Image: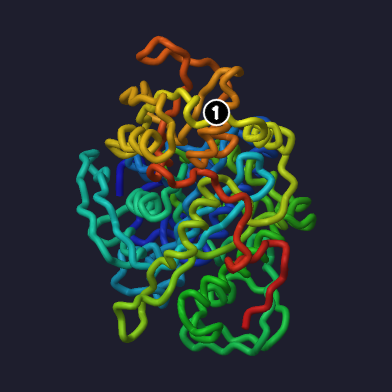
Amino acid sequence: MPPQRRRRGAQEEEPPAGRRGRRPAKKPKKAKKVLLWTSGTVAFLVLATGVGGYLYLEHLNDNITSVSDDGAGTGGFKKDEAINILLIGTDKRTGSGNEGYGDKGSEGHADTTILLHVSKDRSNATALSIPRDLIVDIPDCPTQQEDGSEKVIPGETGVRFNTSLGQAGRTPSCTMRTVTELTGIKPDNFMVADFNAVKTLTSAVEGVEVCLGKDINDPDSHLNLPKGTHKIEGEQALAFVRTRHSVGLGGDLSRIELQQQFLSALMRKLKSNDTLTSPSKMINLAEAATEALTVDSQLNSINKLKDLGLELGKLNVKNLTFTTVPVVDNPAEKIKATVVLNDAKAPEVFDLIRNDVSFTEVKKQQKKEKAAVAARLKGAKAPASEVRVRVLNGGAPAGSAQSTLSWLQVQQGVNKSENAGNAPAELAKTTLEYAPDQADQARRLADIMGLSGSAMKPGESVTNSQGVPAMTLTLGKDFKGAGVSLTPPDKAPDDIKKSTADKVVCAE
């Protein structure tokens, strides 16, 4: 792995139970998230304890292992923006007591992956599970090597998602690039955990309660529990998140639902008063969390984890939604082993997350601001023939400005329009800037283009090539083609299967 890895001492061939940097699957998802919030809280508390607290924070820093993100992320989360964290659990077998789990020959694949999206206003979050057997295209992956050099690992088309890590020397940054390719969402950071994360974190909080809707006796995962509610930790917790054949339809999608139920239970336990008010539990959590994962190079200190943890700590579990990328069985297979995107549903789910739309009914903190933005669309609209606009390309595919101009003039009657070439800088989202006296023109063009109120930017007019005032339409990276609406959905569809972390669900 790359040289930015941070180790607390000499590397051992078999990492001790305290330092698992990157491995396992299902549990890590929540484990990682938990870790962020927990270690952040602990770090905040011990800062007030003087020299002893400082030394302890240094100890926690030494627990952390970091790996280069190879430029695949955004450069790290920001406190005033929505947050996207990629949580990866691997099936690598290293670590105390894990010799019998996972694939003996595996280098550590992306066995369990969650894209955690936290809204800009911190009122809600969505945890999107990505099936390991989903067929995807893996892009070329520039990857930092141990000696500091860079190697481009060739991409592949039509392969399982889990091979985006471990296979052919791919590191977590390649999984990050694959998620961006799949969803259109670029993660800010990644975190990778191993099997031990499940065991140590559940033990640190003295167990979490799960519910079984039937008896389960799975010889593969070694889970043997009767129907009802149980408190599980350690090896039993790991068995719970690994069981597959005894729940649902016996496949990986059923196991994902089980893991989401488990992570919800873990979150509820972490948020409970008996955990928050127990110094010993908080310290144990900080130790377990910092030792259980590998983070990207933008999250390589306890202070950075603390800052992220404080942001995550603002969430209410009732507004944390778990869902899974919509998929269907791979039609190319007679014996079903893999899945492909459900083209009718998956794009809408990705759009919801990209546009920071909650999957739960929450009262937004910026409600007044949103109402003001929506109001920009209300009012009189000028005739299309009176709309004067300059069209610029600010990150859309090459030729978009000209094709949009032709569409506006030929099909929509916006004759007073012109192609102004490339914008000074690329924009993530398409925008329409206009002066106050051009509001009626702006509303007409927004209606024609399918622009949302947030795309409309009251400002100043510019002078077009004929020397008269005109608006400026800049086509951003979100532009999908002339005539394709850019108004994002404002709620999750009713037919998307989802659950929230505050609800207790019994595994069937």
Q: Is residue 208 left or right of residue 464?
A: right
Q: Which residue matches tag 1? A: 442
Residue at the spot 43% in from the left edge and 38% down from the top edge? 412
- Name the one closer to the observer, 273 or 291: 273
- From this view, report whether residue 277 is shown above or below residue 421: below
Q: Quadrant of residue 311?
A: top right
Circle 1 crowding by C-alpha within 10 Å: few under 14, some 14–19, many from 20:
many
- Disc 1 marks a residue whose amino acid type is Ala
Helix, strand or loop status at disc 1: helix
- From this view, report whether residue 457 is shown above or below residue 483: above
Residue at the spot 68% in from the left edge and 51% down from the top edge? 282
Q: Quadrant of residue 481?
A: top left
Could you tell me if residue 11 is visible in this image?
no
Name, please, the residue furthest toward the top: 467
Q: Is residue 218 left or right of residue 478?
A: right
Q: Position of residue 421 (x, y in %)?
A: 31, 24
- From this view, report whether residue 414 is shown above or below residue 110: above
Q: Position of residue 381 (x, y in %)?
A: 60, 31
- From this view, report whether residue 66 is shown above or below residue 328: above
Q: How many marks?
A: 1
Residue at the spot 67% in from the left edge and 31% down from the top edge? 379
The colour scheme is rainbow
Q: Is residue 465 left or right of residue 49?
A: left
Q: Position of residue 365 (x, y in %)?
A: 72, 39
Q: Quadrant of residue 477?
A: top left
Could you tell me if residue 389 is visible in this image?
yes
